[in-house]
Image (cartoon, helix red, strand yellow):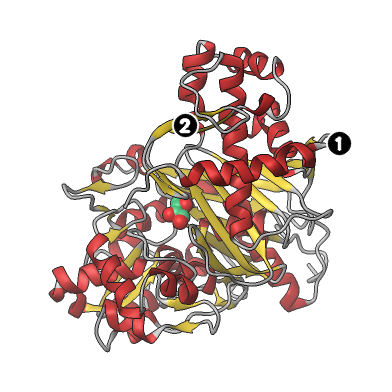
Amino acid sequence: MSEESRNKTFLGFDFSTQRLKALVIGEDYGVLQEADVEFDVDLPEFRTSGGVLRGERGEVTAPPLLWVKALDMVMDRLVVAGVDFSTIEALSGAAQQHGSVWWAKGAEAKLGSLSPDEFLHTQLASAFVAHAPVWMDSSTSADCRVLEDAVGGPEELAKITGSRAYERFTGPQIRKMYRTKPRVYQATARVSLVSSFAASLFLGRIAPLDLADGSGMNLLDIHTKTWCQQALKACGDETLEDKLGSPVPTATDLGPVCKYFVDRYGFRPECRVVAFTGDNCSALAGLRLRSGWVGLSLGTSDTLLLGLQTAGAPPAGHVLVGPTSEAPYMALLCFANGSLTRQNHRDRLAEKSWDAFNDLLRATVRGNMGYMGIYYDTAEIVPRRRPGRWLVEAGGRSVERLAPQFEARALLEGQALARRAHAEDMGFTLDKSSRVIATGGASVNKELLQIFADVFNTPVYVQEQHANAALLGAAMRAADVWSASTGARLPGAEPGLAPAAAPYPGDDEIYTPMLARYRELVKTIPTLD
Ligand code: XUL
């Protein structure tokens, strides 16, 4: 068959916290096959709960071998699903951010000489010196303070690395390992992020970190795109830079897939491995977010992804190097109070029914006659505030209780105002070409999307094709990088978006003053520190 007429497909992976997912797309970016492995259910021998192991003092880890074994399994499930690996031109992946994988000395040699007759997990059984601390770990507060002090304080660290120090970020995690398990640290040849670890399995050597996921470490200078020497010094010894290696842009073709995959699954030896990245960075690529667009993931917590032209120093949230050329930088804002908080109050106000809750919303008007609320059922991290409920009336006086319909709207408008205010604090500006692209479980709720359209004064869209933007983004990035390097144009470069809600005229007059009132109200709430 000639090169042109051969079917071309692209493979994406998502090494997320609870499962490993894989998906194949065609030239039109349409999904052809999918497979998935759920860690707790499919690999019970690792005894994880929700994909992780928990310690007594906020430690949360996962065994890297679990992920390796899951890869063996998902590959076999792709075979069963009918995937023809000889058609795959390029593959890439997404992974949970911040987690670190500690490779033993000699591991890279093992990666370079994998036998196609055996599973990966049997050959890599002794490749790791420790369990991987993951993003849910909260045991490094002391390390965070030391790191911030070493560079001149939290604001200075945010200026350089895009974030103040966060417990889950890899720098503080590395410092904790160096401090509490020096023998593990010394026995480690290389430290990967979960994303670059996963890419290494396909590449047959330790893959470089990519700049976008690398920005989730509190170690990278996001302006010069090189390691911040003061931060490295605060987190480890003089070997740390070599352990980490040099990061590469996310849109990097790392090389061909290793022989193991060619011999065992029938990949072509030319199939390319494109740098893997963090799940949020991959979602930004999967949603094709440009500067001025907002990705809104409505899950247990709400995550906002923003394409940025320049990197500011965020007071809360994170600025990362962008994974695509459309967005040189991106911002990530994780709001702890998302769907779970919405559901709690739906249950309280509307007998556990979204229909009844939406009826309450329809009985009110935009701006809620001036009633406004902030609901933190759990401590909030953007901004860092204590749990509680704060309600005010138009004149700014606090009120104890409100009729259910006013509470329903106060809750949702309050959440949307917070999302917008903190996006603007990241240097994000809305303009005529802006769009909000909603994903996640709650993105099916039209009333909720309407409130976001009004508060942002911007149309809201939902993705037509696939609910998992990070997974789809992985396959799409493989296709994009392959197409850029070969010069072959692919018909599917623009994924479909369906309009879901449009702003009403006059939104600006209602919500601009409310945004100012939100900023005043949030200042009065006790902070976490
Ligand atoms: C982002 C973060 C999470 C993980 C989830 O900072 O910690 O969203 O990436 O996989």
For the question of whether residue 23 can be seen, the reply is no
**In the depicted structure, whether residue 181 falls above or below residue 151:** above
Of the residues under marks 1 and 2, which one precedes in the sequence? 2
* Apparent side of residue 159 relative to residue 72 in the rendered image (left or right): right
For image coordinates 53% across by 80% down, the residue present is 248
Looking at the rendering, which quadrant does residue 267 occupy? bottom right
**In the depicted structure, whether residue 298 falls above or below residue 274:** above
Q: Residues within 10 Å of mark 2 (few under 14, many from 20)?
A: some
Residue 37 coordinates in the image, percent (x, y): 43, 44
Residue 413 coordinates in the image, percent (x, y): 62, 33
Q: Residues within 10 Å of mark 1 (few under 14, many from 20)?
A: few
Q: What residue does disc 2 label?
A: 390
Residue 44 coordinates in the image, percent (x, y): 28, 40
For image coordinates 23% across by 46% down, the residue present is 54
* Apparent side of residue 169 relative to residue 426 in the rendered image (left or right): left
Task: Name which residue type carries label 1.
Answer: Pro
Looking at the rendering, which quadrant does residue 321 occupy? bottom right
Please, what secondary structure does the residue beneath circle 1 have? Answer: loop
The answer to which of 91 and 120 lies nearer the viewer is 91
Q: Quadrant of the N terminus?
A: bottom right
For the question of whether residue 527 can be seen, the reply is yes
- Cβ–Cβ below 8 Å for labels 1 and 2? no
* Of labels 1 and 2, the one closer to you: 2
Give the residue at the far bottom of this rendering: 238
Quick check: is the Cβ at mark 2 less than 8 Å away from ligand 1? no
Please, what secondary structure does the residue beneath circle 2 have? Answer: strand
Residue 145 coordinates in the image, percent (x, y): 28, 67
The answer to which of 2 and 454 lies nearer the viewer is 454
* Apparent side of residue 295 relative to residue 77 in the rendered image (left or right): right
Looking at the rendering, which quadrant does residue 441 occupy? top right
Q: Which mark is residue 505?
A: 1
For image coordinates 72% across by 63% down, the residue present is 291
